[in-house]
Amino acid sequence: MTDLTNPIFTDEDKARAHLEALRWPDGPVCPHCGATDLHIAAVANTGKRTKKVPKGKKHRPARKGLYFCNACNDQFTVQVGTVLEKSHIPLNKWLAGFYLMCSSKKGVSAHQLHRTLAISYKSAWFMAHRIREAMRAGGLAPPMGGDGGVVEADETFIGRTEFPKMKAGFQHKRAVLTLIDREGEARSFHVERADSLSILPIIKANIAKEAKIATDEAGYYKPLKRHGFDHESVRHSDDEWVRGEIHVNRAEGYFSVFKRGMKGVYQHCSEKHLHRYLAEFDFRYSNRIKLGVNDTMRTERAIRQIEGKRLTYRRTNGA
């Protein structure tokens, strides 16, 4: 998978086979009941099923990639139970969309997807958000720095908040908190305000007590020691940027790429969608070349995360 001339990006049958191999490496699994391939029959070629369909139960007409589960008498494709469910966009274009968004360090705009994939702008916009949903880490992730490593915590501000409550300082801006584990992982959060009340609960939930936390001199990090964390900071106001292993240079590097992408590629982001863009930049940072993850591997990791996630246009668009 090196460029968009790969057959999985041009041939829907090859794309389907590739997607099935990534999702079901040991054979098809029914997304309705969890039955394995021993209970599943393909109905694409013959249109016949090994069991009679119960009266009144509707099924799709036989087509490529369609399976019938003898355990629960239901049909499914590789898209069922994933962010691709009920999409009419060809699978080869879906895989191309995943590749473009995973291989572009600063992201790909919906207009670029619209032009490259020859789909409508509305479809490209929704596709991008569903790919971001696949990139999003689901469930409870293990605490960062559990091996006693250094975790950087830093905040930045981007764009004017659409729900201003206060005008002082940076409180009219959208605040983002990012945690960087020096082992490689990034986790970012859109917080209502950059203060201790918003930041401390996130740090407690995401950073292990064994970790050493490195920050700048911002006042809202001062309570960390009282809460049992090993915390050190550098004083940027005194031109102190590094003191031994204490610095936030990686977090600032993350923000540099994030802001270049948001301002140069996406240009405008509604505040209600900011968390989705953060998930996208977190995913690429946590699966970058320096950690031995190339474009192909990064794309396949994102595709493997499509299962168990759904995102409807109405919910995404806020209609």
Image (cartoon, helix red, strand yellow):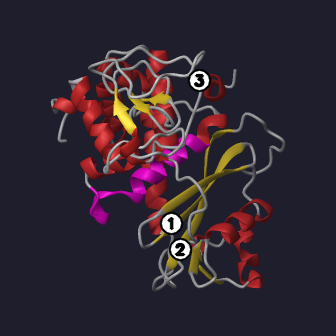
| Marked residue nearer the N-terminal end (2 or 1) | 2
Query: Magenta segment, principal secondary structure?
Result: helix
Specify few, some or many for label 1: CA neighbours under 10 Å numbering under 14, 14-19, or 20 or more.
Answer: many
Q: Which residue is mark 2?
A: 151
Closer to the camera, 276 or 164? 276
Is residue 57 rendered to the left or right of residue 193? left
Is residue 17 rendered to the left or right of residue 255? left
Q: Secondary structure at mark 1?
A: strand
Mark 2: amino acid: Val
Q: Position of residue 18 (x, y in %)?
A: 26, 38
Range shown magenta: 275-293
Is residue 150 rendered to the left or right of residue 158? left
Closer to the camera, 145 or 107? 145
| Marked residue nearer the N-terminal end (3 or 1) | 1
Asked if the residues shown at circle 2 and circle 1 are in contact, with their CB atoms under 8 angstroms apart, the answer is: yes
Q: Disc 2 and disc 3: Cα gap in Å?
A: 36 Å
| Marked residue nearer the N-terminal end (2 or 3) | 2
Q: Disc 2 and disc 1: Cα gap in Å?
A: 5 Å
Q: Is residue 12 magenta?
A: no
Q: Is residue 281 magenta?
A: yes
Q: Which residue is mark 1?
A: 180
Mark 3: amino acid: Tyr
Q: Residue at x 44, y 73 (%)?
A: 182
